[in-house]
Image (tube, grey):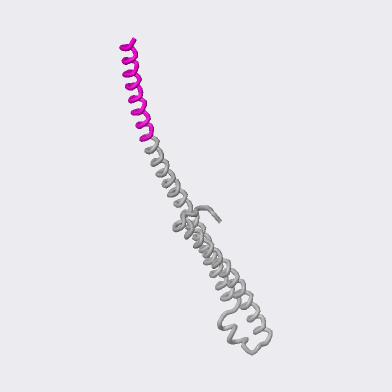
Amino acid sequence: MILTFGGACRKAAELKRKLNAQIGELNAQITAAGRLDKRFHYFDGLKKLAKTLTAEASGLLDITKEFRSKLESTQKELSQDFTDEEIDDQLGDEDFMNDFAESLFEALDSLGKKCDEVIADCLARKKRLTDALIWDKIGEE
């Protein structure tokens, strides 16, 4: 019986070594999985950042096109409504000067409002890009 008990102790010790070795391997795998998980979050962040940059660049291109169109339409409107010769000929006419001044004011006021809109949009985009690039706050507002 003593020999059997000694053999059982050796078996138990061997089994304990195997279990400890497996636990060590599992801990190493858990550590590796944790490191991979951190890297996946890093790549998810890069993917979100690329999406944000693309969306902001696209939006900036759209607002720039709108602003250019507004500039061109204002210039075209003013140049078609009042030619240089017409302005020189009608300079003494009070009704013409009032029409010219009113038309000029409306065109410049409309252009000024569009400028304010573009400035506000650009400032908002700058904040979103700063948050995404520097502070890693992608999609937060």
* Highlighted range, magenta: 1-28
Instruction: State the residue lying farthest toward the front.
Output: 2
| Vertical placement of residue 60 versus 17, above or below | below
Q: Quadrant of residue 26 in the image? A: top left
How many marks the image carries: the answer is 0
Q: Residue drawn 39% across and 42% down?
A: 35
Q: Residue drawn 49% across and 58% down?
A: 131
Whether residue 7 sits left or right of residue 51 in the image: it is left
**Residue 8 point in image, percent of width and height:** 34, 16
Q: Residue drawn 52% across and 59% down?
A: 62
Instruction: State the residue lying farthest toward the right.
Output: 95
**Residue 23 point in image, percent of width and height:** 37, 30
- Magenta span has 98? no
| Vertical placement of residue 20 versus 82, above or below | above
Q: Quadrant of residue 116 in the image? A: bottom right
Instruction: State the residue lying farthest toward the bottom.
Output: 92
Q: Residue drawn 35% across and 32% down?
A: 24
